[in-house]
């Protein structure tokens, strides 16, 4: 019996992050990671209650149809885990990392954007990323967030031609979120001529991992 199955047997039934944490005597962050692993292995299904997320855990694996969706790909590549608000599967094709990064920026959700930053290390097609960013008029935001990522973790180098193309991109508006500016990333904002709803404190979660 593998470790995930053993945990699924021990936690079988209806659980929350809090009950998993109490049952295993572990931190909340560790409980979230365990829930993520159990879901990935097929032992857990989650859904959102009125104000709390619930998990149905069973030692019998669930068979998932289709390919990983937005939240699953985010969780796969980022060291910081999100509990997805819903199950999302892709039928008939695979979602690319480039698409997920653009979708994450489009959410304008600060936590999702922060979690998505690590996707820059898994970009296989910079041209595709540039093309998708151009379609959404997010080119300079993509470039600015790439530079933000470089301040917190090591990131693979972006092709210079792509970087120049992003620098020359057009944006619908200079603010990603309402009229929020950064207090700590002004140099990056000036370089890309956009405003970011992020500060150093928002990025500290990367330092904790």
Image (tube, rainbow, N blue to C red):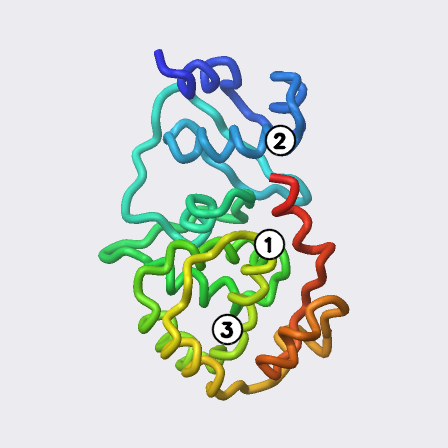
**Which residue lies at the image location 55% right of the left edge and 60% below the top edge?**
149
Q: Which residue is mark 2?
A: 17
54 in relation to 154, above or below: above
Q: Is 122 in front, or is 137?
A: 122
Identified at 44% across, 59% down, the residue is: 120
Estimate the x, y position of residue 44 in percent, counting from the top left.
45, 30
Outermost left residue: 92
Disc 2 element: helix
Badge 1 is on which residue? 152
- Which circle, 2 or 1, is nearer the viewer? 1
**Left/right of residue 75 with respect to residue 48 in the rendered view:** left
Q: Name the one closer to the observer, 48 or 35.
A: 35
Residue under the image location 42 percent in, 58 percent down: 156
> Is the C terminus in the top left, top right, bottom left or bottom right quadrant?
top right
> For mark 2, does the 10 Å Cα neighbourhood hold few (<14), some (14 to 19), or many (20 or more) residues?
many
Spatial CA span between label 2 and label 1: 28 Å
Q: Is residue 96 left or right of residue 118?
A: left
Q: CA distance from mark 3 to mark 2?
A: 36 Å
Residue linked to disc 3: 143
Of the numbered discs 3 and 1, the one sitting upstream in the chain is 3
């Amino acid at each position: 019996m593998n470790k995930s199955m053993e945990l699924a047997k021990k936690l079988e039934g209806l659980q929350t992050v809090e009950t998993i944490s109490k049952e295993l005597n572990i931190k909340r962050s560790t409980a979230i990671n365990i829930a993520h692993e159990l879901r990935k292995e097929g032992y857990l299904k989650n859904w959102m209650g009125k104000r709390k997320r619930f998990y149905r855990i069973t030692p019998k694996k669930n068979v998932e149809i289709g390919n990983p969706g937005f939240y699953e790909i985010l969780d796969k590549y980022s060291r910081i885990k999100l509990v997805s608000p819903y199950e999302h599967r892709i039928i008939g094709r695979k979602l690319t990392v480039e698409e997920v990064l653009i979708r994450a920026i489009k959410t304008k959700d600060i936590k999702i954007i922060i979690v998505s930053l690590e996707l820059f290390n898994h970009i296989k097609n910079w041209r595709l990323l540039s093309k998708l960013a151009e379609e959404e008029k997010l080119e300079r935001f993509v470039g600015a967030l790439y530079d933000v990522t470089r301040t917190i973790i090591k990131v693979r180098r972006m092709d210079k031609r792509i970087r120049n193309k992003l620098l020359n991109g057009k944006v619908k508006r200079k603010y990603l979120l309402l009229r929020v500016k950064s207090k700590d990333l002004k140099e990056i904002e000036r370089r890309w001529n956009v405003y970011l709803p992020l500060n150093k404190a928002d990025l500290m979660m990367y330092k904790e991992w």
